[in-house]
Image: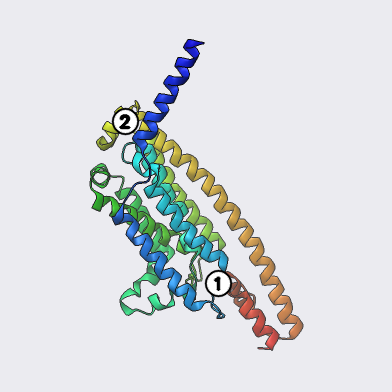
Amino acid sequence: MCDGRSSVLTMGSAGSLVLAHVGGAQVAPLQLGPAAAYGLLYGVRARHLAGTPRAVPRWRQTCFYGGLLVIVLALVSPLGHVADELFVAHMAEHLLLTDVGALLLVLGLTGPLLAPVLRIRALGWLRAFAHPLVALPLWSVNLLAWHIPVLHDAAVRHDGIHALQHLGFVGFGMAMWMALFGPLPKPAWFGNAAKLGYIIAVRLVGAALANVFLFGGGAFFDVYAPGERHWHLAPRTDQNAAGAVMMVWESLFTLALFGWLFWKAADEGEERQELLDLAAARGVPVTETRAARAVAAGRGGDLRRRIEAGG
């Protein structure tokens, strides 16, 4: 009985020490400032559009603020503290920022919401920033560059560089997702087949980096050595765990994106055929190409109204 009670007390003491070490919320003003500013600007614009035909749908607002919440929690929760000590935690944090947070932010955007920004001449380059042939290389370079040991170590050691790193992950992550889910016009050639290739390319870049961490040999980052000693984790084990987390996440996310693309292709095909049938019944000349472009751009409803109006 005494031995059992001692074991429980020992485990409880160890758990308390771990919780005390991890601590509570982390304060990161350089990283939380942009999130607060974007949330404020989004709220002001969404309120301005409320009650008009261009109002931001509630589900999009939920996505945007959900994305900000994911980003903030990734930075200020205990994960943000452990991410400075273990590479596997840092990897989990970056996946939340780039894949979950950035994706939700993009899903929260609409054309009317972005209109004031896009009308600023100095920011006209943002349209090209979301082009798939621009977004994919920039996202890839950013991802790979920040895992070069000298840059990665500097980001962990210096708050300013760390904030820049996270801003890059979110910003370039948004650009990568904008090509698939964003409200800006897509190139005519960027149909479902091209999107499938785009998804595969994105996932291959992530998988290649994950394989480097899994099978690349010794640990690449010295900055985690003190934390790994504290957590009694070998540097190579920490790195392998980070690669495994990335590989599993990439696989699951790829399957989800494939499912979305196949559903979208079937849904678009059905809507396109409905528009063509309606046009034929009303005697309005509408080509299959025109119907396909309207549906792909999310403007099938506009074309439907024109057909019903007789033009």
Res 266 quadrant in image: bottom right
Q: Position of residue 123 (x, y in %)?
A: 33, 74
Give the residue at mark 1.
297
Whether residue 137 is visible: no
User: Which numbered dot is residue 198?
Assistant: none
Q: Position of residue 147 (x, y in %)?
A: 31, 45
Q: Is residue 284 left or right of residue 199?
A: right
Res 122 quadrant in image: bottom left
Whether residue 167 is visible: yes
**Residue plotted at (73% across, 76% down):** 277
**Position of 76 relative to 106 (above/below):** above
Give the residue at mark 2.
228
First in sequence: mark 2 vs mark 1:
2
Q: Position of residue 173 (x, y in %)?
A: 41, 57
**Residue type at mark 2?**
Glu
Q: Position of residue 175 (x, y in %)?
A: 41, 62
Residues under labels 2 and 1: Cα distance? Answer: 49 Å
Q: How many marks?
A: 2
Q: Look at discs 2 and 1 and give the one toward the viewer.
A: 2
**Residue type at mark 1?**
Ala
Residue count near mark 1 (Cα–Cα under 10 Å), binned few <14, some 14–19, many ≥20: some
- Report the residue that reaches farthest toward the bottom: 310
**Position of 21 relative to 277 (above/below):** above
Which part of the image, by quadrant, shows the C terminus? bottom right
